[in-house]
Image (cartoon, helix red, strand yellow):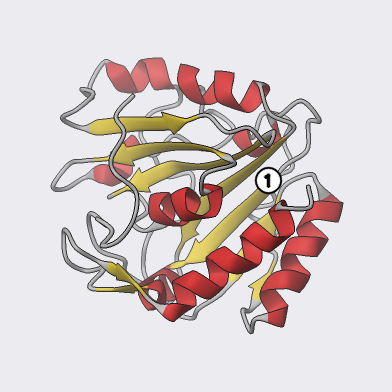
Amino acid sequence: MDERPRGIPLSVRGSVRGHETIAGMGRYRSFRQLTRHGRPGVDFVIRFRPGRSGVLIMAPHGGAIEPGTAEIAEAVAGGNHGFYSFEGLRRRSNGELHITSTCFDEPTAMRAASACRTVVAVHGCKGFEPFVQLGGRDERLKDRVRKALEKRGFKVTEDPRLPGRSARNICNRGTTGMGVQLEVSAGLRKAMFQGIRQASAARPTEVFLQFVEALRGVLALV
């Protein structure tokens, strides 16, 4: 798999807009279907790094599909948790590469998830206001994530349209069958990076660092 060097400045492809489409609007219903029309290294790239903690942090709609999500996931994973991202590389129409979470069956992602106890999936959702929506079947971990983020001043909600409770959802594909889904609003992602509207060299802000630190603190106890 492609391994981009970690660290900052980060590369955030595409732009984040408050009217970003809600999850589930992609054209393809499986990875196999997507590969009939999309080429690795041209339309998308897959990055994977195994961890040693039994926790996988993933961004199934990274790159220009949901900008900023891969950077968040990679920073939260750090050097001890597993990291996976599927990233759109196109100049336009990256939304077509969005495979909804219950249909996301890219083989590397499936193997990585099934080898871990806990999967945390980072997504992007629409919204000008800065907020995070939690989903997934791991209620205990969701509660701890909520408290940690709220303690640092982040607004945390839940959206019945994005519950993340299906057993087929990629966040629930770990060995426990329970994971957490984070939907990070366009407004919050914009606040996390300086220059996120540019195609390169977006730098993380203090908001990004606080968000990542909160999640890493929770996951250190999983």
Q: Which quarter of the figure has residue 145?
A: bottom right
Look at the image and tell me whether residue 149 can be seen.
Answer: yes
Q: Residue at x 48, y 44 (%)?
A: 24
Residue type at mark 1 is Gly
Which percent across, then down, holds residue 130? Answer: 50, 78
Using residue 149 as the reference point, say whether residue 31 is left or right of it.
left
Residue 183 picture location, percent across and down: 56, 58
- Residue 162 vs 148, above or below: the answer is above
Q: Residue furthest bottom?
A: 153
Residue found 68% across the figure and 28% down from its top: 116
Q: Nearer the viewer, residue 214 or 43?
A: 214
Of residues 76 and 113, the one drawn nearer to the viewer in this rendering: 76
Judge whether 140 appears above or below 86 on screen. below
Q: Is residue 190 left or right of residue 173?
A: left
Comparing 54 with 92, the one in front is: 54
Looking at the image, which residue is at 52% across and 29% down? Answer: 50
**In the depicted structure, whether residue 21 falls above or below residue 36:** below
Where residue 8 appears, x then y in whole percent? 30, 61
- Seen from the viewer's position, the closer of residues 60 and 206 is 206
Q: Can residue 159 be seen by looking at this rendering?
A: no
Q: Name the quarter where the N terminus is drawn.
A: top left
Left or right of residue 56: residue 6: left
Q: On the image, numbered disc 1 is attached to which residue? A: 164
Residues packed near mark 1 inside 10 Å, few (<14), some (14 to 19) or many (20 plus): many
Q: Give coordinates of residue 83: x percent, y percent.
A: 50, 38
* Horizontal side, residue 11 vs residue 100: left or right: left
Quarter of the image for residue 5 reads top left
Residue located at (37% from left, 58% from top): 68
- Indicate the secondary structure of the residue bearing disc 1: loop
